[in-house]
Structure formats: structure tokens, C-alpha cells
Amino acid sequence: MRLLIILLVFFNFFNPEYNNFYSRNKEKLPGNGFFGFEKKSKAKLFYKNGFLIIEGLDGKANITIYSIIGNKVAFFPNIGLRKFKEPVSLQRETMYIARIEFSNTVFTYKFFTR
């Protein structure tokens, strides 16, 4: 039992899938059963030179940026995502959460500013 717990902790902390420079979304599919399989979005979200950039999503959505403690930092209503690049003033070396709301789907991303 101890070995199982150690292995679970080890694989959660050293999983190379989560060591990316940009955030990837995981959307849980309904009715997955016990294991909760996830569908990964191919979208990329990153912050560079004062601009928030989203690649890989298309259509119109509401985008809300929150600080890690839940304060709303920015809001972009009904904006096209094909070539999304908007200036946003964010603090350096801080984690933020982006909520992208389509008419039928919501994606949530974590990202860091550098």
C-alpha cells in the first residue's frame, strides 16, 4: 500500500505532460464512468510582451481573466478567437486563470506570466 501511494505521488509530480510553457485545456466528457477520461484541447494560451495570445480556437466567445485568488482582471465580451492577440496589463511571475465561454462550452486555462 505504501509503495502504491509513493508511486502515485511520484507520477503526479514528475509527469512530463504538465511541464509545458503554455497551458492546455482538459475538458471532461460527460458519462465517462469511473475513470473520468478527458479530451484535450489543442488550443494554446500564453502571455508575451504584454499581450495575451490564444491560438487553436475559432469562433466568438467571452474571455475573462482572473487572478489566482479569483479577482477579475480583464474581460473581453463576444470576441473572435481566430487571431486573438489583446493587450493586457498583468504582473510578472504570477499565475492567472482564463475562462473562455462559448455558447455551448466553457474552457478554463491556467497560465503564468514571465
Image (spheres, rainbow, N blue to C red):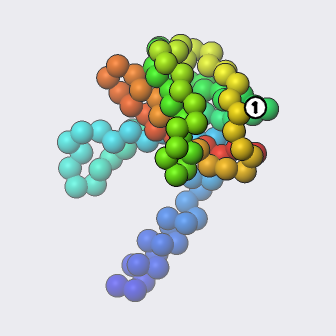
- Residue 100, relative to residue 20: is it above or below? above
Q: Amino acid at mark 1?
A: Gly
Please give the name of the residue rendered at 74% of the width and 46% of the height, measured from the top-left corner. Answer: 92
Relative depth, front residue between 67 and 97: 67
Is residue 61 visible to the viewer in this orientation of the structure?
yes
Please give the name of the residue rendered at 49% of the width and 47% of the height, measured from the top-left corner. Answer: 70
Determine whether, in the image, residue 68 is placed left or right of residue 50. Answer: left
What x and y, as percent, mark residue 16?
59, 56
Relative depth, front residue between 109 and 29: 109
- Residue 52, relative to residue 28: is it above or below? above
Determine whether, in the image, residue 91 is placed left or right of residue 43. Answer: right
Is residue 41 visible to the viewer in this orientation of the structure?
no
Determine whether, in the image, residue 90 is placed left or right of residue 64. Answer: right
What x and y, as percent, mark residue 38?
37, 44
Outermost residue on the right side: it is 49
Q: How many marks?
A: 1
Quadrant into which the N terminus falls? bottom left
Please name the residue that numbered disc 1 is placed on.
50
Relative depth, front residue between 92 and 15: 92
Please give the name of the residue rendered at 50% of the width and 67% of the height, measured from the top-left corner. Answer: 11
What x and y, as percent, mark residue 34?
22, 55
Quadrant into which the C terminus falls? top right
The image quadrant that residue 104 belongs to is top left
- Crowd band around label 1 with a 10 angstrom C-alpha radius: few (<14), some (14–19), many (20+): some
Please give the name of the residue rendered at 62% of the width and 15% of the height, measured from the top-left corner. Answer: 83
Instruction: Tell me the SS state at disc 1.
Output: loop
Relative depth, front residue between 37 and 70: 70
